[in-house]
Image (spheres, rainbow, N blue to C red):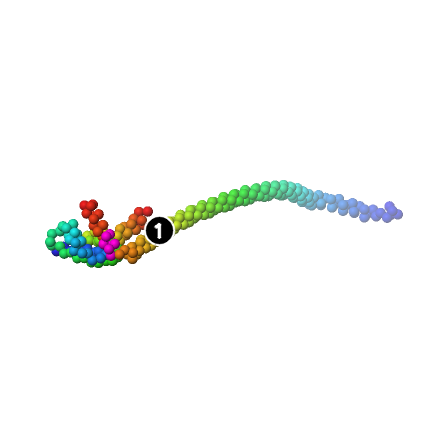
Amino acid sequence: MKKIIVFSPYKLNGEELNWLKNYFSFNNDVVWENIVKEDLIGGLIIKIDSKIINLSLKGILDNLKKKLLYET
Amino acid sequence: MEKLGIDLKLLIAQIFNFFLFLFIFKKFIASSFLKFLAEEKKKQIEKERFEQEKKIFEEKWQEEKTRMKEELEKEKKTLLKDIHNEADKQKKEILDKARKETDQLRERTKAELEKERIMMEKEMMKKVVDLSINIVNTSLRDYLTESMKKDITQMILKNLKKEN
């Protein structure tokens, strides 16, 4: 059974979770979990098995940091 | 004759003695004596010739000695000159080598300093970026309210929808 973990800076409501479920459109053999991580600031991190989709502000800032350090 | 004090018998005997002596001398002694004198003369001549030759030899030896001394002096001067030249040459080589090594050391030091400067700049840049991002991170975390965070999340999801 697939497990999807959604990290968010606040507890997602039902509407938001449904939106995500519809967006990814997996079959019913998927377990969704929402974990609150305040340091994300805003946005989400979605972990599907070992794959990570980082849509958080923290992620954006981290990418910016990497770009500034290694591409200059 | 007796009044003059001359004894005739004695005189005759002396004259006889003289001729007897002369006869004996001529017969037995003269040849050996003359031979002896001739030999002595010959020796004298030999001695003189030897002295002459010795003198000539000494003169030649002196000349040869002077010549050798001059040659030796000349060789000594040449040798000293060569030694000085060689010493100058080596001195120049050592100086050139030292100069070259100093230049190389200077270049290496310059390159190392430049390398260090770049490293320090990069380090500084890294710290500045780290600090800036941390400040932004902390500031946003402290500043954003729950509803702002929700709005941001909604906006991100909306954009996600648009891209796909």
Please report, as a chain letter, where disc 1 is located: B
Q: Residue at the spot x=11%, y=54% of the render? A: A29
Query: A59 or B23: which is nearer to us?
Result: A59
Q: Circle 1 sits on which residue?
A: B125
Q: Taken as a whole, is the magenta stretch helix, strand or loop?
A: helix
- Horizontal arrangement in the rendering, residue B6 relative to residue B138 (left or right): right
- Horizontal arrangement in the rendering, residue B44 relative to residue A52 (left or right): right
- Circle 1 residues within 10 Å: few <14, some 14–19, many ≥20: some
- Horizontal arrangement in the rendering, residue B110 relative to residue A54 (left or right): right
Q: Is residue A36 magenta?
A: no
Give the residue furthest to the right. B3
Query: B55 or B137: which is nearer to us?
Result: B137
Residue B22 position by quadrant: top right
Give the residue furthest to the left. A28
Residue stretch rendered in magenta on the structure? B146-152
Amino acid type for the residue under numbered disc 1: Met
In percent of width and height, residue A31 lies at 14, 56
Q: Residue at the spot x=46%, y=46% of the render? A: B99
Query: B27 or B57: which is nearer to us?
Result: B57
In percent of width and height, residue B61 lies at 60, 43
